[in-house]
Image (cartoon, rainbow, N blue to C red):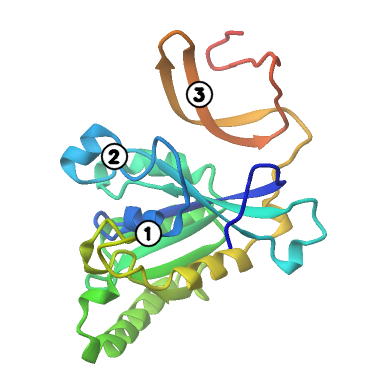
Amino acid sequence: MKMDSGSSRILNVNVGILGHIDSGKTSLARALSTHFSTASLDKHPQSTERGITLDLGFSSFLVRVPDSLLHLPYDQLQFTLVDCPGHASLIKTVLGAAQIIDMMLLVIDVNKGIQTQTAECLVIGEITSNDLLVVLNKTDMIPESTRAEKVDRMRQRILSTIKTTKFKDVQIISIAARPGGSDDVSSCGPPPVGMSAVMSSLTSRVTEGMLRKKGGNFLFAVDHCFPIKGQGTVLTGTVLSGECSIGDVVELPALAMW
């Protein structure tokens, strides 16, 4: 059923999608999302040219509020996916994203297992996040006759590695975000596999502790800053606490400007 966000009261949860380069993070964001920002799916010209994610990408999808949160004044639950770069040289960008995410989705190529940046993302998760979901992507690249066996073997290897972290009881879901490598999942290639399981797992993890604090000082984590001709400088980001309305005066303390 299509969900309309026009007049709904929406509870937003930020999910960071992290993992090694070419593990399929952006493909997963594309498969899950129904709304896309101008900074999503590697639209940056250099990202398109180089074929990798260079900046944070934002997209989202809506689900029904789970029964455990029906007492809250919200009609729908929105997951904003923060697609993070996987290249080692862009770790600072990943650290910036870690400041705004409520939970972490770690993408692992089932054919390669834990790689260098996968391990770095686990370290970041240990420091900045209390909730982790692992997805084993690209399962469609394994022959069907041996798929179940190989996926289970990789699952056990990952659990053995993660058991030394605070995420020792992590859930692992097998998926194929872009079967056959096609970007056009609507008409050309087969549909993504495992998306319902991922959405259900994310929904079950949402708690009242993830609600933004409306009281206190207005605190805004900036993720993008860019000029628009005739309008001035535009900042985009996440409100961590407090509230802001049109016409309010906002102080930028780091620049000592009004």
Give the class, few, some or many, for how many residues have Cα within 10 Å of label 2's Cα (few <14, many ≥20).
many
State which quadrant residue 90 falls in: top left
Q: Secondary structure at mark 1?
A: helix
List x then y, in percent, for residue 23. 28, 60
**Callout in the foreground (2, 1):** 1
Residues at marks 2 and 1, CA–CA distance in whole angstroms: 16 Å
Asked if 192 appears above or below 10 in the picture, the reply is: below
Residues at marks 2 and 3, CA–CA distance in whole angstroms: 19 Å
Give the class, few, some or many, for how many residues have Cα within 10 Å of label 1's Cα (few <14, many ≥20).
many
Q: Which numbered circle lies on residue 77?
A: none
Circle 2 residue:
54
Give me the residue at 62% from left, 50% from top. Answer: 4
- What amino acid is at disc 3? Leu
Please state if 210 lies on the left or on the right of 84 as rendered.
right
Please state if 200 lies on the left or on the right of 40 as rendered.
right
Image marks 1 and 3: residues in contact by CB distance under 8 Å: no
Farthest residue toward the right? 71
Query: Which comes before the other along the chain, label 2 or label 3?
Result: 2
Query: Which comes before the other along the chain, label 1 or label 3?
Result: 1
- Quarter of the picture containing the C terminus is top right
Give me the residue at 73% from left, 41% from top. Answer: 213
Q: Secondary structure at mark 2?
A: loop
Circle 1 residue:
28
Farthest residue toward the left? 49
Between 112 and 58, the one nearer to me in the picture: 58
- What amino acid is at disc 2? Leu
Circle 3 residue:
235
Q: Secondary structure at mark 3?
A: strand
Give me the residue at 32% from left, 70% from top. Answer: 176
- What amino acid is at disc 1? Leu
List x then y, in percent, for residue 240. 64, 37
